[in-house]
Amino acid sequence: MQHPIPLQLSRSLLGAAGISASLHNLERIPTRNRLLIVSNHRSLFDAPLLMTAISRPVRFVYHYYMSQVPLLQQAMMLMGAFPLETGQGRQSSFFLKSARFLQDNQVVGVFPEGADPMVKVNAPHQLSPFHRGFAHLALRVPVDDLAILPVAIASRDEKQGKLAPLEWFRRFDPSEALFQGDGWHSAVVYRHVDVFFGYPLLIDKGLRSRYRGSSGATVVREITQVCWSQIAEFLAHRRC
């Protein structure tokens, strides 16, 4: 995905929506490493916002239900994103696709909070627990120069609305627990945000060696916690 369409589309979407961003710590973005971006997630504008912030296309993974919704699925494809699968093949598909993109030196983006904050919107400073799949991916992908970059999207001004009834989404993904109740799928449209780049975490031989040994689960927890803590700290600081 070396063509500029996803990046151009991202910039156009932000401009059309009137979203502005202040970028902080740009010098922390690795320039010589394969890159895995990890960020908090509250809005459909998060992916185009992060692409615009780093001025590079990013292969974002998105939730299965989005791949079943007309127009939304086409929009995700134009952005260069790829969907999670449903059922037993979900994890293996995520690893295989993400690893291939990283080996091709494409940037991969993951929202480890999952879909929960998108459907049931958190407060701007709130951060949900992270799923650990991105840490497993980083430790397994067969490249020597990978860096995980934590990024915090801290909303200063936004509008919260309703996207569609949960019943409507349930028709496209009946297995999704988030859609089993009543209510609406929320929609957050930023007006202005701060984007904070954290300290990149280099995945070196020492971490990979620990992952292959008896402390594999421990190193995965450590990587997940380091990324979560950096993002949480930025969000808490922005609240003050």
Image (cartoon, rainbow, N blue to C red):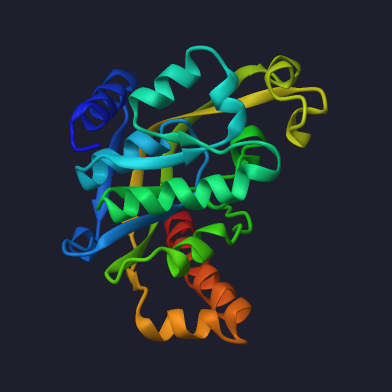
Question: Which x, y percent locates residue 19?
Answer: 32, 29
Q: Position of residue 222 (x, y in %)?
A: 54, 77
Residue in view at x 16 percent, y 61 percent: 31
Question: Which residue corresponds to the image point at 22% horizontal and 26% vertical from the top-left?
Answer: 5
Image position of 31 with respect to 45: above or below = below
Is 184 placed above or below 230 here? above
Image coordinates of residue 152 in percent, x first then y, are: 41, 54
Q: Is residue 124 visible?
A: no
Q: Is residue 176 left or right of residue 134?
A: right
58 or 29, nearer to the observer: 58
Rendering quarter of residue 35: bottom left
Q: Quadrant of residue 142?
A: bottom left
Q: How many numbered marks are there?
A: 0
Report the front residue among 160 and 105. Answer: 105
Asked whether 91 or 61 is in front, the reply is 91
Residue 230 vs 190, above or below: the answer is below
- Quadrant where the N terminus is found in the figure: top left
Q: Could you say where residue 44 lies in the image, as x and y percent from the top left? A: 47, 30
Residue drawn where x is 74% and y is 21% of the image: 170
Q: Residue at point 58% right, 62% down?
A: 132
Observer able to see residue 210: yes
- Side of 149 where 228 appears, left or right: right
